Image (spheres, grey):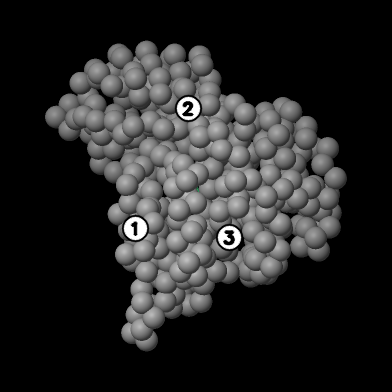
Amino acid sequence: MDWIDLRSDTVTRPGQPMREAMMAAPLGDDVFGEDPTVNELETFAAALFSKEAALFCPSGTMTNQIAIKVHTQPGDELLCDVNSHIYNYEGGGISFNSGVQAKVLQGHEGRLSPELIENNINGRFDWLTRTSLVSLENTVNRAGGSYYTLPQIQAIQTLCKEKHLALHLDGARIFNALAVTGDAASDIGKCFDSISICLSKGLGAPVGSLLLGDKRFIQSARRVRKVFGGGMRQAGVLAAAGLYALNNNVKRLNEDHNRAKALAEALSSKPYVESILPVYTNIVIFILNKKVMNGEQFEAKLREQGIRVSAFGKDTIRMVTHLDFTEEMLNRSIKVLAAIL
Ligand SMILES: *Cc1c(COP(=O)(O)O)cnc(C)c1O
């Protein structure tokens, strides 16, 4: 069966042109810094975000974890929203890899404000944990793909500078945010000390994330990547897919956003839906009406019709639109959602 897969935007598979780019890529040993395609990708991405340097890594978990490691000392504290990926979905890596603790904050739709951050910075007493890092997520996965505006980010940057805190962006879906706000990547880049971007989500590459920062930061990050076991050799085959993705798949992201809105619209009047989070980008999160069906039942019913979604907790469902979710699939999904009872 030709599945409609809405579980995540990670499920996309490289199409023919991307595969051809991978086949054609010149290669070398990237641990020696000699893979021309990896170097090209790193240079391209760094320039795009107005950063000095970049580091190609196997996953967004690794880019985030490397950033945390480089920005902190064991025993430090970082501030992040309670919904954040670094806290929820990276296997406890904040403490495991860096010996750092997280103070999780209750932001608005997964977004932190300068006031919230400022109220949670520890003072300089021996008995308090040293606050050293703030991590933002944009867009916020668990909050329905909500995003920050540039002035919101700039206000946080100003505070972090004043308080001598490093500021990291988990930008796994930063291009989804930029597609909506129209902000330039270079303006976002200027706000952060480090940025993680994913090539294997909405952009459709099979593997890969990039960590961006200044030269000194990336030099340290390169060493930590090796220690974490993330040094790759002829990684240009993967970097070529990343380059293809950045050049071709960024400008179409609003198609995904429109399809996500159409799915939400189709769900809005259904008796099995209790409520839907606002749809900001490519993520639809909704809560089922328990009296009609629970998450497991909903998932099973859709699976029978060839549609896969993920249950996000007992009664919460997440659907994510992406490059391989076509207009025809959208129409089929809307029909299934109408006929499900
Ligand atoms: C997917 C994702 C990551 C990275 O995930 P990997 O599977 O390790 O590449 C990081 N942050 C957010 C918000 C994500 O959605």
Residue marked by disc 3: 193
Residue in the picture at 82% in, 42% down: 25
- Label number found at residue 257: 2
Of badges 3 and 1, nearer the viewer stands 1
- SS under mark 3: loop
Q: In this view, does 337 lie to the left or right of 27?
A: left
Residue in the picture at 67% in, 37% down: 246
Q: Which is more toward the observer, 188 or 56?
A: 188
* Figure quadrant of the C terminus: top left
197 vs 233: above or below = above
Residue marked by disc 1: 115
Which residue appears farthest toward the left when viewing the image?
291
Figure quadrant of residue 296: top left
Q: Is residue 334 left or right of residue 220?
A: left
Instruction: Compute the Cα span from label 3 to label 1.
Output: 20 Å
- SS under mark 2: helix
Measured as percent of width and height from the top left, residue 253 is found at 56, 29
Q: Which amino acid does label 1 sit on?
A: Glu
Q: Which is more toward the observer, 17 or 108?
A: 108
Measured as percent of width and height from the top left, residue 194 is found at 58, 58
- Label number found at residue 102: none
Of badges 2 and 1, nearer the viewer stands 1
Q: For residue 331, say whether it is visible.
A: yes
Q: Earlier in the sequence, mark 2 or mark 3?
A: 3
Measured as percent of width and height from the top left, residue 193 is found at 58, 60
Residue in the picture at 66% in, 69% down: 220
283 vs 76: above or below = above
Of badges 2 and 3, nearer the viewer stands 3
